[in-house]
Image (cartoon, rainbow, N blue to C red):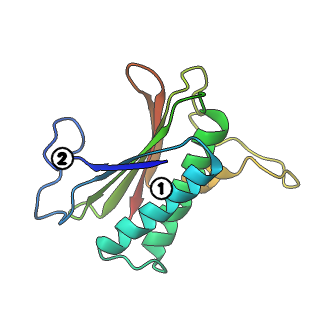
Amino acid sequence: MLTETTVPADEPGRGALTDAQSELPPLVAQFASSPRGARLARRLAVRRMEEWGYPSQSDASCAVALVVAELAANAVRHGRVPGRDFGLRLALDRAAGLVRVEVADAATAKRPPAAPPSSAPEGESGRGLLLVDALAVRWGSAPRHPLGKTVWAEMPV
């Protein structure tokens, strides 16, 4: 299930953007904590990038799509709490030349590592945060109240 809402650009504490920096307010949506929900999050991110003027085949859109896919997949795989959705927030700051991706889940027990883990070359998984680290200007995580965490990444456009 997908629930899409938008947050006013001047909402306090959310990296407010001015009208001159972005024609559209940040995208905020909730998704079922499932592989289908993760795919929908990626598709919605690509659609919003197109609305912001970055075609789906552009480097910026592809990088944002990959980061959203990796963070959403991690939220589904490692942050899933039965009965709880995960959230996506995408905000464009044209002046800084950045898109901020935030993926929030309800799990509080496991926070992502401060640095991407090394993975074995023959391993089938474990490269998601390495990709995020390679594509993002910076990334990290923060606790989410009343429960859960938000993993974020800032991408150049």
Whether residue 98 is situated above or below residue 54 in the rendered picture: above
Residue 63 locus on image (x, y percent): 50, 66
Whether residue 113 is situated above or below residue 101 in the rendered picture: above
Amino acid type at circle 2 is Ala
Residue sitting nearer the eye, 140 or 42 = 42
- Answer with the quarter of the image where residue 118 lies: top right
Residue 84 locus on image (x, y percent): 52, 31
* SS at badge 1: loop
Whether residue 157 is visible, yes or no, is: no
On the rendered image, what quadrant is the C terminus found in?
Answer: bottom left
Badge 2 local density, few (<14 within 10 Å), some, or many (20+)? some
Instruction: Please give the name of the residue rendered at 60% of the width and 33% of the height, measured from the top-left corner.
Output: 80
Residue 125 locus on image (x, y percent): 77, 49
Left or right: 71, with 155 as reference point: right
Going by the picture, which residue comes out furthest to the front? Answer: 1
Residue sitting nearer the eye, 132 or 150 = 150
Residue 88 locus on image (x, y percent): 42, 47
Instruction: Please give the name of the residue rendered at 51% of the width and 60% of the height, measured from the top-left corner.
Output: 42
Disc sitting over residue 136 in the figure? 1
The residue carrying mark 2 is 16
Which one is closest to the eye, mark 1 or mark 2? 2
> Disc 1 to disc 2, how far (Cα)?
20 Å
Whether residue 107 is situated above or below residue 36 in the rendered picture: above
Instruction: Please give the name of the residue rendered at 36% of the width and 74% of the height, measured from the top-left corner.
Output: 50
Left or right: 61, with 70 as reference point: left
Whether residue 139 is situated above or below residue 145 in the rendered picture: below
The numbered mark, 1 or 2, whose residue comes first in the sequence reads 2
- Answer with the quarter of the image where residue 14 lies: top left
* SS at badge 2: loop
